[in-house]
Image: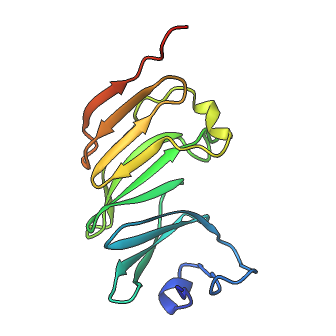
Amino acid sequence: LVELKSPMVSKHGLYAPSLSFKTNSPVIKHFHVTDSALVVLFSNNTYAYFKKAKAGYQFSFIEPLANSIEQVYCLNSKTLLFANMYNSHPKSNPDPVVLKVYDLKQKKITKSIIPSFDGIEFSHFTPSHWLSIQGEKIVLSQTLNYKFSFYNRNLEKQEDIIVKPRSQ
């Protein structure tokens, strides 16, 4: 159980009663857990970071984000990956598809790319799962073809795998 009532949390306007049935905004939008950390992205574009402790996870800090983000992942204990894979209105989010590496120590984006992504209009249908993280490997799949692009934690493309369906 994670208790988010603290001066650090409330100063950023986040309130989430201890997992009760009634919550005040914001709600959890996305989260990712690893052996060493838990990171939670909230609907008010704020994220909370928890370090692994002897028993569970210990709250470390909470930070607001400058731009709208749909997903967050822990690449390692020093680096997060923020991702958008959603066809949002250009005024609310100019980059519907973007991957950003975030340095936890510097508290800033160190690298950002806009990868090619076909069929962004399909992002309105849920559930969807086009991004996968395995350790420090980042895999992005396309919506309309069987193509998987592999990136390292510096967002450098390593390879593409294209699966061709059997002709009928």
Q: Quadrant of residue 104?
A: bottom left
For the point 48% across and 59% down, the residue is 66
Q: Is residue 24 left or right of residue 158?
A: right
Image location (x, y in percent) of residue 49:
41, 74
For the point 54% across and 30% down, the residue is 143
Image location (x, y in percent) of residue 71:
50, 55
For the point 71% across and 79% down, the residue is 23
Task: Judge whether 101 appears above or below 21 on screen.
Answer: above
Q: Quadrant of residue 45?
A: bottom right
For the point 33% across and 71% down, the residue is 35
Between 108 and 59, the one lying in front of the other is 59
Q: Is residue 97 left or right of residue 18?
A: left
Between 10 and 146, the one lying in front of the other is 146
Render colour scheme? rainbow
Q: Is residue 133 left or right of residue 14?
A: left
Q: Is residue 95 left or right of residue 152?
A: right
Quadrant containing the C terminus in the rendered view: top right
